[in-house]
Each structure stands twice: as C-alpha cells, then as structure tokens.
Amino acid sequence: MKENPGEVRGPGGGFDAGAEFDRQVEGLVELGYPAAAGLGVQEFRSLVDPLRAVAEDRGAGECFPEAGRVPFLLVVTRQMVPIERTMELTAVHGKKKPGFVDRSFEPGSLERFVPVKEAVLPHQDAYLLLDVERGEEFCGVVPGDAMAVIAERGRTPLTVEEGVALLTHFPQTLVKNKCFSLGGSRCGDRRVPALWISAGAPKLGWCWEGNPHTWLGMASAGGRGAR
C-alpha cells in the first residue's frame, strides 16, 4: 500500500481522487479482502469499481491523514468481511502487530452494534464515506456531548466498519492521544465503540457514553455515497 496517500496528485498537482480510489482498492486486494469475502480478485474489483465515479464526483478535498482529515474512504461492510477479520488486517503505522477486537465484547455482542439512524448505510456491501475527520477536538469531551455537536453540524458519526476502514487505508490517523470513538454503531446500551492503541497494536474496544477520555475523540464524516 502506498506509504504517503496524502501525496496522491494529479497532473496539475492537486489531489487526484481517482488515483486515491485506485490506491485504496489495491490496498484491500493486497491485504486479502477478496478471499476473505469469498470472492475472486476480479469479482471484488467489479463490485467496488463503480464507486470510482463517486470518488471522482464527490471525493475532492484535503487529504492530510497525519492531521486526521481525509476526503473519502472505501468501506467494505461486515456483510462482506467480518469485523474480527478486518481488524486482524490492520496495524499501527510503521508496525506489523495485527489489530484485534477486545475481549470486553462478550461473545455475540459485536453483531448487536449496528448503525444508528444518523448513520444509514447507502449499500450493504461497499460504499464511500466522505469528508472524514478523526475528531481529536473531542478529546476530553463526554462521547454523548460530542455526538450531539456532530449532529448539530449536520455530520454523521462513524460506524465500526468505517473506523476500521479509516485505520486500514490511513494507519497514520491512529496515534497516541489521538484515538477515536465510533458513535455510529450502537447496541442500545451506554457503550460506544472506539479504536485505540494497546500493546503496540490497534484495538477495537468500547467506552461508556458518559465518560470522557483525554486521549479519545469522536470520528465523523460529511456523508456517504454509493451507486
């Protein structure tokens, strides 16, 4: 996978959304997403390739992963590849130790964390998440309050799969003291999923919606798109 995705540029020097989309597709292919989804490589490409036009049409913007801002993400849902598997394919930037789902998710509980009404998915298999921020401005803010501000801004909190996609395509976004909650997936109780670093690897865990953490913000996006 390209080491400096923020440097994907077009002939005029500006951000090249088509080239960035291609980079993300190739990265998923290299990680083994097609096989994990039970598809051949060409089948996988055929599934996601229509989204390239969406990226070119709606994916322009700033791409500064180190600052936690990217114009779009190619998201593959748990209907295609289980979250437990996609987490294993992540790593902290510059390291190889695979990510994991924390054991605080009791058996079967992760499946109950589904998109909230503010995070309706445009497609059940794959789609684009647009105008993404990891949300470190919300570090130290109660998650429930952070989600209220995000809603007031007309933005949407990220689901678990979308958080995994951000980490997968842009591992530079997950760093010490700038980790992020994923308020777009809930299960009806006070738990809010989150991604942070544990023992040198990405961990998918959860925190209480009423408890602030100085090292944990709230990721959000401007919208979603599919064809």
Image: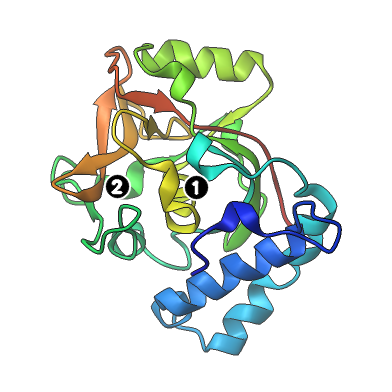
Question: Where 99 falls versus 113 (above or below)?
Answer: below
Residue 156 versus residue 95: which sits nearer the camera?
A: 95
Number of dots carrying numbers = 2
Residue 220 is left or right of residue 88, and the answer is: right
In space, the residues marked 1 and 2 are separated at their CA atoms by 14 Å
Residue 178 is left or right of residue 5, and the answer is: left
Mark 1: give few (<14), some (14-19) or many (20+) Cα within 10 Å: many
Q: From the top left corner, tell me how far across and down residue 159 is, in percent.
A: 47, 41
Question: Where 133 falls versus 121 (above or below)?
Answer: above
Residue 68 versus residue 81: which sits nearer the camera?
A: 68
Q: Say what amino acid the circle numbered 2 marks.
A: Leu
Q: Which mark is residue 162?
A: 1
Question: Where 90 falls versus 49 (above or below)?
Answer: above
Residue 31 versus residue 19: which sits nearer the camera?
A: 19
Residue 12 makes an appearance in the image? yes
Residue marked by disc 2: 110
Q: Secondary structure at mark 2?
A: helix
Mark 2: give few (<14), some (14-19) or many (20+) Cα within 10 Å: some
Query: In terms of sequence position, does the residue under pointer 1 or pointer 2 come before the other?
Result: 2
Residue 155 found in image quarter: top right
Residue 158 makes an appearance in the image? no
Q: From the top left corner, tell me how far across and down residue 108 is, in percent.
A: 23, 51
Quadrant position of the C terminus in the picture = bottom right
Q: Nearer the viewer, mark 1 or mark 2?
A: 1
Q: Which residue corresponds to the image point at 60% horizontal and 38% vertical from the top-left?
A: 132
Q: Say what amino acid the circle numbered 1 marks.
A: Glu
Q: Secondary structure at mark 1?
A: helix
